[in-house]
Amino acid sequence: MSESTQRLNKYQQLIRWQVSHNSWGWDVVRIFLGLALAVRGVVFLLNPETIAELAPGRDLSQVSSLVAYTHLIGGLLLALGFMTRIAALIQLPIMANASFFVALEWGLASSNQSLELSLMVLFLLSLMLIFGAGKLSVDYRLFGADRLAT
């Protein structure tokens, strides 16, 4: 067997492995996003003025606790992969507001990068809503692959 044929076979083996394990990548993204949102929720709970600093000139005192607890609880649910679509859905209005009403004022490529990051989180949450959790999730363990697709 030639060296190029061996390389092709190894490449094909790698692709087969990746196809059979492609849910893992999605799970890692979901877990990281969930933990990041949960940490953001803790930061907002410990320092409520952080929300006011992100949106100067706006009175967000009435919604700061809601935002903090939504990030904390929704983030933990996402990280666990439990009620994933609902956890993503409850985060979407907050991230849409953060993207289009707060960070949009700063514009693209600003020093704080809030618009780019909030749009990325908004996009990932939208994907979580559409595709749900992967195999490494409570949803998968409780409901199996058949019920997750519906």
Image (spheres, rainbow, N blue to C red):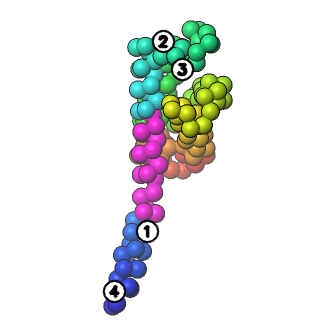
Which residue type carries mark 1? Ile
* Region in magenta: 18-34
Q: Is residue 67 above or below residue 32?
A: above
In the visual, does 43 lie left or right of 67?
left
Decide which of 54, 32 is in the foreground and name it: 54
Q: What numbered label is drawn on residue 15? A: 1
Residue 4, located in which quarter of the rendered image? bottom left
Number of numbered discs visible in the structure rendering: 4
Q: Is residue 126 magenta?
A: no
Percent of width and height locating residue 109: 56, 38
Q: Main secondary structure of the magenta part?
A: helix
Kindly tell me whether residue 142 is visible in this rendering: no
Q: Is residue 33 magenta?
A: yes
Q: Which residue is under mark 2? A: 49
Which residue type carries mark 3? Leu
Tell me which numbered mark, 4 or 1, is placed earlier along the sequence: 4
Q: Secondary structure at mark 2?
A: helix
The residue shown at (41%, 33%) is: 35
Task: Determine the CA span between mark 4 and mark 3.
Answer: 57 Å
In the visual, does 102 lie left or right of 136?
right
Q: Which residue is under mark 4? A: 3
Which residue type carries mark 4? Glu
